Structures are given as structure tokens and as C-alpha cells.
Amino acid sequence: MWIGQTGDRRIPPATSRPEPLGPGECEQLAALVAELAPDWSVELRHDVLGCPTIVILPDDLDDANGPVLFVHREGSAFHLEELRWSTYRKLDEYRAWAEVLRAVRIRLAWEAPFPTTLTDQRC
């Protein structure tokens, strides 16, 4: 056997594609959104090519209530984007689904109303 010869070991081609977004991911995002923004909705939609996108919508599509968030997958990366004030922008891309959940949690936390503070009531 020659040095460096691999024999009969063959590496399969990397042609398998990652699973597209589906109802499971949509349910996970819906649970997260219900915790932070209970009036918002989460929907699984498909574009004209059939590619799935999860859309997170405020209770009223008024921009003052928050942005519309989009989560989709391209190749092995998840993308988080938003539409607000007539501007569509890419927020970031992530390799792991847990990173997407964390990013959505942080983004929604920014949209949550600030709690009212207690006033100092000294006698």
C-alpha cells in the first residue's frame, strides 16, 4: 500500500441539502414570540418558488408597533431580515437554529414596552 492511499474508503459527495424551514421551526418561533409579544403572530409562508419563509408580524402592521421579521434559509445559513419604515434590511445570518432563536428574542426585547417605574413615595 502506498503512503497516503485511502484504499476503498470513499467520501460521499456533499450534495445533500439542508432541510428547509418547516412547521417545527415555526412552532418554536411562535412559542418564543408568544412569550415576548403575545399579540404578534407567526406564519409559515412560501414564495413563488416554493421556498419557505417564517414571517413574524406585529398585531397591527403599523410601523410604530414594530417591524415585520423574516426568517429564511439559503444553503446552510439562516437569514434574519426586517421590514420597518418602508426599509427592508438584512439583520444577520446564522449557522445554527439556536442562534436564530436568540437573535429573534433579542430583537423582540427591543420592541417590548419599558416597564413603568415606581416613584419614590417618602413621607
Image: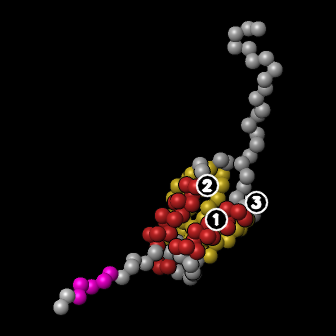
Quadrant containing the C terminus is bottom left
Question: In this view of the protein, which residue sits in the foreground, 115 or 103?
Answer: 115
User: Disc 1 vs disc 3: Cβ atoms closer than 8 Å?
Assistant: no
Give the spatial CA distance, label 3 vs label 2.
23 Å
For disc 3, the marked residue is 49
**Which color scheme is applied?**
secondary structure
Q: What is the quadrant of residue 88 in the picture?
A: bottom right
Q: Residue furthest top?
A: 2
User: Which quarter of the figure has residue 39?
Assistant: bottom right
Q: Amino acid at mark 3?
A: Leu
In the rendered image, the residue lying farthest to the front is 123
Q: Which residues are magenta?
A: 117-121
Contact between marks 1 and 2 (CB within 8 A): the answer is yes
Let me know if residue 119 is in the magenta part: yes
In what element is the residue under mark 1?
A: helix
Q: From this view, report whether residue 96 is shown above or below residue 36.
A: above
* Label located before the other in sequence (1 or 2): 1
Residue under the image location 52 percent in, 60 percent down: 103
Q: Residues within 10 Å of mark 2 (few under 14, many from 20)?
A: few
Q: Are marks 3 and 2 in contact (CB under 8 Å)?
A: no
In the rendered image, which residue does mark 2 sit on? 97
Few, some or many residues within 10 Å of mark 3 (<14, 14–19, 20+): few
Whether the magenta-drawn stretch holds residue 44 is answered as no
Q: Amino acid type of disc 2?
A: Trp
**Three-letter amino acid code at disc 1?**
Gln
